[in-house]
Amino acid sequence: MKWCHIPVAGHALLAVACADGLIGLYQLLRSKVCELSGPPGAKESERGRRRPEPGAALQVPGWRLQRFVPQETAYRLQPLTSFALSKQGLALSLDWSTGKAGRDSCQPLKIISSDSKGQLHLLQLGEAGSQLHEVAAWQAHQFEAWIAAFNYWQTDVVYSGGDDALLKGWDTRVPSASVFTSKRHGMGVCSIQSNPHREGILATGSYDEHVLLWDTRSMKQPFADVPLQGGVWRLRWHPVHSHLLLAACMHGGFSIIDCRQATEKKQNMCTICVSHTLPRSLLYGADWSWLTLCRLPEEQLSSHSAPLPGCSLVARTGDEGGGQWPGPPCPGSLAEVTSGSKESPPLPSTEARSISSQRHSPRTKIRVCDPRVGRPDLDINLLATCSFYDHVLHLWRWDSS
């Protein structure tokens, strides 16, 4: 699943590739929380807050709406439309054409998707933003087409990777033959992403446990090769820092790769900033948060700096009690914010750890940044991972200062 990088008809739009062969679109809508007051004698446990059903008044026998609570806005996903790629096949991946920052707003919104039959499907969103139609479909690989992705800088070009260990490039205007075919990966190609900040940079990952960086002007050989532990199932460039790449590596957990030397100087030199393995799980998904965070002293906290829904991102210092959170991480390390487990998170293994041991100042908290209150701290990063066997979504904070 992937969020569209820009709002559509004023709403965030989520696309989901489903096992039944469908591409589903969902709108993110706000839903105000209301307080209910019950009839005389109602149990205290029955009183509380409910969200009104979409498009209908809140009608509960014997109860009345007391007031809306606008500061406690909830969100829900509303199904918008869907498109069937093929019969008796699985939708395996998708990508939006909107990844490049500063994209021309008059360009059509497109989705490229791949399926278990080795086919690619180019879809376009209608002008009203509520319908998908197929522009083109073609056979790309002999076996499963694990991944398909746009060149964000030239959206007529897409890339695909398959279980046949081939990486291919396509011009969607004439998709009958590939623009190039690479056998550089030794096993199935399962992750591809174009760099949204730097033109001409492409990252690919494979079951062969390598991340390759390519100059899209010359796809004969990659200019950097990064060996990792585990098959590289997903790759995500950082939404702000053009040199940071997040990799989900199945049994190898996840890694954050610093590609600055490689992308700026085309040197075969990348650094693993953080590598963390989750025991007894296969990590298939990883992504960065696009929220801008800032550090605020306790006395400066206000209603303008809203906490993240469902969690308090408190950076505790060594002399604070509670025992529920580990101490603030050393720069370059990770702290788990929340997960499906109540156990204390294991300390991650890290590489290229900063020598500095500077901690957050006492009584400092991390909040979603409001420019009226605080300055963004781009060294604070949130990322999420999801794993297979344990069905757990983890949210991590990484301080890269």
Image (spheres, helix red, strand yellow):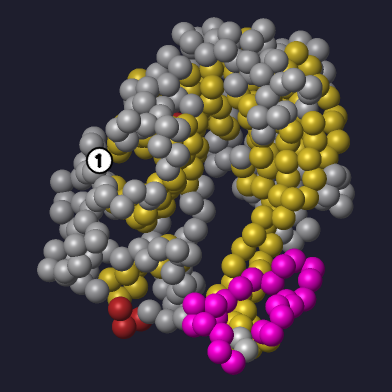
- Percent x, y for residue 49? 57, 76
Q: Residue at x 66, y 34 (%)?
A: 17
- Percent x, y for residue 269? 34, 25
Q: Residues within 10 Å of mark 1 (few under 14, many from 20)?
A: some
Q: Is residue 394 above or below residue 75?
A: above
Query: Secondary structure under badge 1?
Result: loop
User: Which quadrant of the structure image shows residue 302?
Assistant: bottom left
Residue 42 lies in the magenta-colored region: yes
Left or right: 234 as drawn, with respect to 360 = right
Residue 72 visible to the viewer: yes
Between residues 251 and 98, which one lies in front from this camera angle?
A: 251
- Percent x, y for residue 122? 78, 29
Q: Residue at x 63, y 15 (%)?
A: 144
Kind of residue at disc 1 = Pro
- Percent x, y for residue 114? 68, 24
Residue 153 lies in the magenta-colored region: no
Residue at the farthest left position: 319
Q: Residue at x 61, y 83 (%)?
A: 36
Q: Is residue 373 above or below residue 314?
A: below
The residue identified by callout 1 is: 348
Left or right: 336 as drawn, with respect to 222 = left
Residue 107 visible to the viewer: no
Left or right: 101 as drawn, with respect to 249 = right
The residue segment tinted magenta is: 40-63
Quadrant that contains the N terminus: top right
Between residues 55 and 165, which one lies in front from this camera angle?
A: 55
Residue at the farthest bottom position: 40
